Every structure is written in C-alpha cells, then in structure tokens.
C-alpha cells in the first residue's frame, strides 16, 4: 500500500480508539463525516491531501473542555502519534496548526494563521453543524442540556452580543439564528460555500416548517 494511505489508515484507527468515550457531538462519527467532507472539498481545491486528511482526522482529538481548558493537549497528542509514524516535520507542524486554529471561537482570537488545508478542514467541520446533520446535532445537544425546543418569548440574539442573555436557558431553535445561519458566510473555499448553500437552505426550510407547525398553520 502507498505510504501516505498507510499513515492515513493508522491515524483513523488511532483516532477511533482515542474517541471511544467521547461525547455525542464530537464522537468518531463526527470526525468521520468531517474527514469525508474534507476529502470532497479537497478534490476540488488546491491543497496538500495528506495534511487535509490528517488535520480532519485529528482535529477533535482532545477537546479542551475535557482537559481543564488546556488547548495544548490535542496538538501534543497528534505530534506524538505522527512522530511514531515517522511523518515529516513540516506535515506534523501543519497538522498541529490546524488543530490549534480550527474552532469557531478560534476565528475570533485574532490569529492570522491561514493555509488552504486549514481552510478546507474548517469548512468541513462547520458544515457538520449545518443541514440535516446539523439539525440533529443541535436538538441532540439541546436535549442533553434539557433545553426547550422553542419558546416564542425568548428571542434569539446575535452570537457576538450574547453577553447579557442567559444562554443556558435559550431554546434550541435560537441556536439556528445565533450560530447555524451565520456559518454559510464563514466558508473559506468555493466548494465549501456551495455545500453550505444547500445545507443552509435545508435549515431555512426546516425552521419555516417548524414555526408554521408551531402556529397550527400547516
Ligand atoms: P464546535 O465543535 O464547532 O466548537 P460546539 O462544541 O459548539 O462546536 O458544538 C457541537 C455541536 O453542538 C454543533 O452541532 C452545535 O451546533 C451544537 N451546539 C452547540 N451549542 C449549542 C446550543 N446552544 N444549542 C444547540 N446546539 C448547540
Ligand atoms: Ni469538529
């Protein structure tokens, strides 16, 4: 087997083991979807395929939420694994940087790191919060937090101005207006944007139908 494919397969097995006890939102199947979507986007964009695939596979390897907010655990674990696999230094450091810079919040921390490979993996990760899967993940998260589906009295607020608003009481439908509908305009790549447009339209159709049913209109 080709050496690169072998590294990718070993990494997939490693990540699957690492995520055995992960919570539902960031489990192995999330990673597998992001990996597939990243490959789909990379097929239409100019980027290093190995870095894209390793970045997608390793991007959620150690969620800082479960390591006392320590954001260095993921990159360190990825490096240790890739060194054992004798991956070259340039590839390892590119993958570490993808893990460091991928999160939604990360895009607000003033970082200027930007590569075609990070662009692709970030698009793929954001796409997994959109469309049918995104809807399922949002209500799964809301159910886990015991949130209401919807409450006509609690109006959604823009993501950036959420400070005064009790987020932990916000119904799940608000999340669409606060975050999910904003993702379409954050896509980095042309291919990601195309996929995002379909998924965005699907979520719009969903919320429209949801509200019509809520009001007994359909
Ligand atoms: P990321 O991995 O991109 O940082 P999060 O950990 O914020 O994403 O969210 C993981 C999943 O849970 C996403 O699909 C997201 O839409 C969903 N989610 C996060 N916060 C909420 C919320 N307040 N209500 C509903 N779904 C949420
Ligand atoms: Ni992710």
Image (cartoon, grey):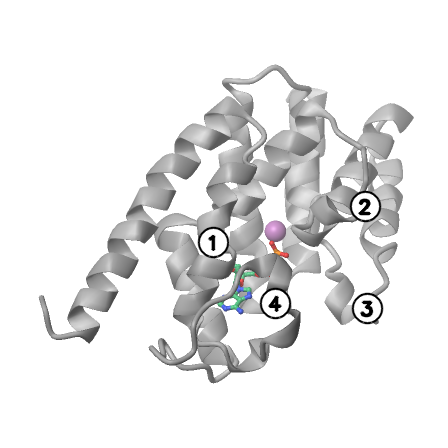
User: First in sequence: mark 3 or mark 2?
Assistant: 3
Give me the residue at 44% from left, 78% from top: 143
Determine whether 166 is above or below 78 in the image: below
User: First in sequence: mark 3 or mark 1?
Assistant: 3
**Which of labels 3 and 2 is toward the front?**
3
Label 1 CA crowd tier, 10 Å (few <14, some 14–19, many 20+): many
Q: Quadrant of residue 24?
A: bottom right
Label 3 CA crowd tier, 10 Å (few <14, some 14–19, many 20+): few
Is residue 61 at all visible to an observer of this figure? yes
- Report how far apart the C-alphas of labels 1 and 2 lie in the structure: 29 Å
Residue occupied by mark 2: 78
- Report how far apart the C-alphas of labels 4 and 2 lie in the structure: 33 Å
Label 2 CA crowd tier, 10 Å (few <14, some 14–19, many 20+): many
Residue occupied by mark 3: 67
User: First in sequence: mark 1 or mark 2?
Assistant: 2
> From the Cβ of disc 4, is ligand 1 less than 8 Å away?
no
User: First in sequence: mark 1 or mark 4?
Assistant: 4
Q: Residue 1 vs residue 171: left or right?
A: right
**Which of labels 4 and 3 is toward the front?**
4
Residue occupied by mark 4: 162
Front-lying residue, 183 or 51 = 183
| Coordinates of residue 74 in the picture (x, y in percent) | 80, 53
Q: Residue 38 vs residue 135: left or right?
A: right
Is residue 9 at all visible to an observer of this figure? no
Which element is circle 2 on? helix
Label 4 CA crowd tier, 10 Å (few <14, some 14–19, many 20+): few
Which element is circle 4 on? helix
Determine whether 73 is above or below 107 in the image: below
């Amino acid at each position: 087997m080709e050496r690169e494919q072998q590294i990718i397969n070993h990494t997939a097995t490693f990540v699957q083991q690492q995520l055995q006890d992960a919570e539902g939102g960031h489990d192995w199947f999330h990673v597998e979807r992001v990996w597939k979507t990243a490959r789909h986007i990379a097929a239409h964009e100019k980027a290093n395929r190995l870095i894209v695939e390793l970045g997608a596979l390793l991007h959620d390897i150690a969620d800082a939420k479960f390591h006392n907010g320590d954001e260095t655990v993921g990159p360190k674990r990825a490096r240790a694994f890739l060194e054992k696999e004798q991956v070259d230094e340039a590839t390892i450091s590119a993958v570490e940087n993808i893990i460091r810079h991928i999160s939604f919040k990360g895009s607000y921390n003033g970082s200027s790191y930007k590569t075609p490979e990070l662009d692709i993996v970030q698009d793929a990760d954001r796409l997994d919060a959109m469309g049918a899967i995104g809807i399922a993940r949002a209500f799964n998260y809301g159910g886990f937090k015991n949130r209401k589906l919807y409450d006509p009295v609690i109006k959604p607020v823009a993501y950036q101005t959420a400070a005064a608003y009790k987020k932990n009481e916000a119904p799940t439908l608000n999340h669409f207006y606060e975050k999910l509908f904003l993702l379409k305009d954050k896509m980095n790549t042309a291919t990601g944007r195309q996929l995002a447009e379909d998924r965005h339209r699907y979520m719009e159709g969903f919320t429209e139908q949801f509200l019509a049913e809520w009001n007994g209109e359909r």
